[in-house]
Amino acid sequence: MAISRYRNTNVIDKKYFETVDFPQIDVTKISTFSIRITDGDRLDNLAFKYLGSGEYWWVIALINDIDWSFDFISGQIIQIPTDAEEVLKFF
């Protein structure tokens, strides 16, 4: 008979993640510039390059309406905010 290694694991609380609706960002109210996506570009690398931290990848995704599949292709033009703090003020 097999013995589970999880038999003594206590389950304290079952929390399920909720869907969060991000606010719509009016791109006309923030300063942005355009870049053209090239092969191999990733949102975290673009955020690091232009915003100083890869942790702001979601800011670029949000203002460009890029969903969680990270759907962008080489040659596509996207907007980069000049300052991530401008986007954060919408929260």
Image (tube, rainbow, N blue to C red):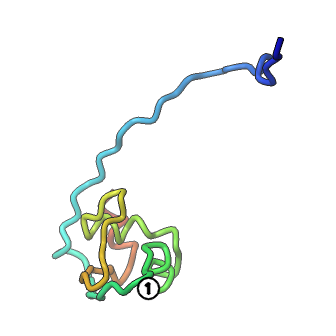
Measured along the vertical axis of the image, is residue 71 above or below residue 3?
A: below
Q: Nearer the viewer, residue 73 or 19?
A: 73
Q: Nearer the viewer, residue 24 or 43?
A: 43
Q: Name the residue furthest front.
A: 1
Q: Which residue is mark 1?
A: 50
Residue type of the residue flagged with mark 1:
Tyr
Q: How many marks?
A: 1
Q: Residue drawn 51% across and 68% down?
A: 55
Percent x, y of residue 8:
80, 18
Q: Quadrant where the C terminus lies?
A: bottom left
Q: Residue drawn 26% across and 80% down?
A: 78
Percent x, y of residue 25:
23, 64
Q: Name the residue furthest top.
A: 1
Measured along the vertical axis of the image, is residue 61 above or below residue 30?
A: above
Left or right: 65 as drawn, with respect to 57: left
Q: Residue drawn 56% across and 23% down?
A: 14
Q: Does dot 1 land on a helix, a strand or a loop?
A: helix
Residue 5 picture quarter? top right
Residue 4 picture quarter? top right
Q: Residue drawn 45% across and 35% down?
A: 17
Q: Residues within 10 Å of mark 1 (few under 14, many from 20)?
A: some
Percent x, y of residue 70:
36, 64
Residue 26 picture quarter? bottom left
Left or right: 71 as drawn, with respect to 46: left
Q: Quadrant where the N terminus lies?
A: top right
Measured along the vertical axis of the image, is residue 16 above or below residue 78?
A: above
Percent x, y of residue 52:
51, 81
